[in-house]
Image (tube, rainbow, N blue to C red):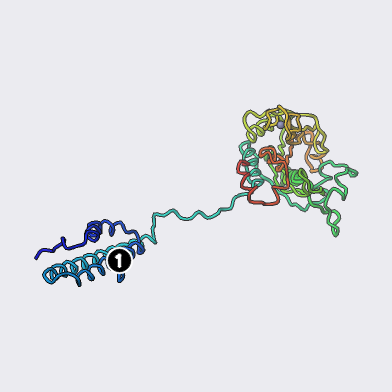
Amino acid sequence: MSLRFDLLPPTIAEAHQHFEAWVSAAQDVNDINRLKGVFIGRKASHLTLLTDLLKQTPKESKADLGALINHLKMTWETALSLRLEQLVSASASSSVDLTLTPPVLPQGAVHPIQRLEVHIVSVFRTLGYHVEEGPEVETEEHNFDGLNIAPNHPARRSSDTFYFEAHPHLLLRTHTSPVQVRVLKRLSQKNSQGVSLLESLGGIRFLSPGRVYRKDEIDPTHSPMFHQVEGMLIGKNIGLQHLKGTLSYAMKALLGADTEVRFRPGYFPFVEPGCEVDVKCPLCKGQGCRVCKSSGWIEILGAGLVHPHVLSHAGIDSTAWSGFAFGMGIERIAMIISECPDLRLFFENDLRFLQSMREVR
Ligand SMILES: [Zn+2]
């Protein structure tokens, strides 16, 4: 006996034609429940409508319509529960999708000052320099006496330097230069044959990066703690030409190949002659701007030939050996490179600022 689809009311006949397409388009349990409501639900569904219709149908057609209703009920129920099973198993397997990109967790980074320090050291490493370190708590002898700083020099005042009350000869180093004194003293030591370490090495070149302390009020360009990198080279017949060649190369490596370098006479007790080193302002290319105070040049480091007193204080023969030394402030260079006008930002650790400092190497 073939099914009498012609007995269906037109709306239900049309709905049945679309049924399969609707079921396969269902994306989740909600879609399935909506279709169930429309086709086989207990209230006002196509099925209840057909059941009502059966009651009013003349006897001769009742069996045919009854058979058709059973067929449709079976078809709809089976298709809907099959699709529901498919959707449930698909969502279960997709909950462990191994191809998904894992969430990106925030990562820490090296502080811009530390990064710049590492970069400066790497530039000088290519010139054969190694790193020497010294303590931040120093003696007056290493911090001042050994560096030819006069007993009445203003830098020694307790208004400029942090001394330890209980140990008046101890202080927080005001520069990284005491490392020079420590290294030179070590190099002057002689072995059993009377040969000094400096003689057996034939010379030395090193950098000493680190923290230094001064009694400065905190303002946009001063801080009681900041970072310096000090460098020294000791050898035979070392002159200003070696100093100029080394620092010109280093400034170009640090600030860019087109960096222009200028040397001006300057005074520091531990060098003779001394010089101050300027670079043509990398921001305005010498045109004059806020950072270079309209001069077109920025003072970037102090340098000079090692004073004979510094060598002889450490026990090194200043007639046989000579050398040069230089020092620079790391924050100062970071401020120039990043155009940051306020030193304090480097210490306040505001992540928004630190993340914006990515260009500082
Ligand atoms: Zn400028």
In the rendered image, is residue 230 in sight?
A: no
Whether the residue carrying mark 1 lies under 8 Å from ligand 1 is answered with: no
Q: What element carries label 1?
A: helix
**Quarter the C terminus occupies:** top right
300 or 209, which lies in front?
A: 300
- 350 left or right of 167? left
Q: In this view, does 33 lie above or below 195?
A: below
Residue wearing tag 1: 36
* x and y, in percent, of residue 1 in the image: 9, 66
Mark 1: which amino acid? Lys
* x and y, in percent, of residue 108 in the image: 58, 53
- 312 left or right of 67? right
Q: Which residue lies furthest to the right in this view?
A: 152
Q: Residue furthest left?
A: 1
* x and y, in percent, of residue 196 in the image: 73, 42
- 80 left or right of 265? left
89 or 111, which lies in front?
A: 89
* x and y, in percent, of residue 230 in the image: 72, 41
Q: Residues within 10 Å of mark 1 (few under 14, many from 20)?
A: some
Q: Is residue 271 above or below residue 115?
A: above
View quadrant of ligand 1 = top right
Rendered image quadrant of residue 76:
bottom left
Q: In the rendered picture of this protein, how many numbered marks are placed on residues?
A: 1
257 or 340, which lies in front?
A: 340
Q: In this view, does 111 lie above or below 86?
A: above
In the rendered image, is residue 208 in sight?
A: yes
237 or 179, which lies in front?
A: 179
